[in-house]
Image (cartoon, rainbow, N blue to C red):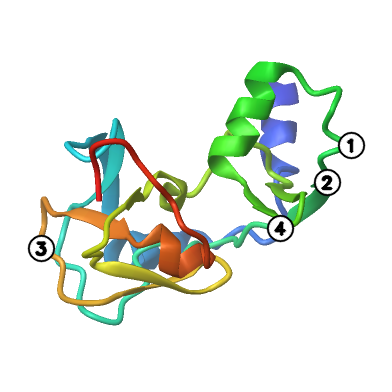
């Protein structure tokens, strides 16, 4: 047990206090994952998300390493598929969270919609475009957010 406790204590330097975490649970948790009619898994509101709110504000922001496609050639195909699905890639450079894939933000599960209720306003920052009710799927327009055209079979 002491190895585990030591590992947990060393996971990150910017840990919230007990009181800060309680405040975050009260005021900052808005979403959960669930089966999506749009595509596989999606993000759903578990309480009202007021217009202008970032429903993915975290207590300890991610920090990233950047790798070229060349540097990732030796990564297994399964891990590379995970990187392709969940990491931003611009001009052949991937942004990979230092905390690895075991602590991904819910935002990586946002599904695409041409009538989104959320937008990415800055790298990793989001804003609700309207009031979002509990049970609603939270979506974003990939084309607008990533300045690229995305085509999906059977979906807008």
Q: Residue furthest bottom?
A: 52
At mark 2, the secondary structure is: strand
Dot label at residue 67: 2
- Name the residue rendered at 75%, 23% in the picture: 3
Quadrant containing the N terminus is top right
Dot label at residue 137: none
Question: Which is nearer the N-term, disc 3 or disc 1?
Answer: 1
Quick check: 97 above or below 20? above
Badge 1 density bin: few <14, some 14–19, many ≥20, Cα 10 Å: few
Mark 4 or 1: in front is 1
Which residue is labeled 3 in the image? 133
Q: Residue furthest right?
A: 71
Contact, mark 2 vs mark 4 (Cβ under 8 Å): no
Question: Which is nearer the N-term, disc 4 or disc 1?
Answer: 4
- Name the residue rendered at 43%, 53% in the picture: 107
Which residue is labeled 4 in the image? 63
- Name the residue rendered at 46%, 47% in the picture: 108
| Residues at marks 3 and 1, CA–CA distance in whole angstroms | 43 Å
Quick check: 67 above or below 81? below
Which residue is labeled 1 in the image? 71
Mark 2 or 4: in front is 2
At mark 3, the secondary structure is: loop
Location of residue 85 by image quarter: top right
Quick check: 1 above or below 90? above
Contact, mark 1 vs mark 2 (Cβ under 8 Å): yes
- Name the residue rendered at 52%, 67% in the picture: 147
| Residues at marks 2 and 4, CA–CA distance in whole angstroms | 14 Å
As rendered, which of 125 and 13 lies closer to the eye?
125
């Amino acid at each position: 047990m002491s190895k585990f406790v030591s590992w947990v204590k060393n996971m990150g330097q910017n840990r919230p206090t007990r009181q800060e975490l309680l405040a975050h649970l009260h005021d900052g948790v808005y979403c959960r994952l669930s089966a999506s009619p749009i595509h596989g898994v999606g993000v759903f509101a578990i309480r009202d998300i007021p217009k202008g709110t970032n429903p993915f504000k975290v207590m300890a922001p991610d920090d990233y390493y950047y790798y070229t496609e060349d540097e990732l050639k030796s990564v297994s195909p399964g891990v590379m598929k995970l990187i392709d699905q969940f990491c931003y890639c611009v001009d052949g450079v991937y942004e990979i969270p230092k905390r690895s894939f075991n602590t991904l933000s819910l935002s990586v599960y946002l599904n695409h919609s041409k009538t989104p209720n959320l937008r990415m306003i800055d790298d990793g920052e989001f804003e609700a475009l309207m009031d979002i009710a509990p049970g609603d799927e939270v979506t974003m327009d990939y084309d607008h957010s990533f300045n690229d055209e995305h085509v999906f079979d059977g979906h807008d």
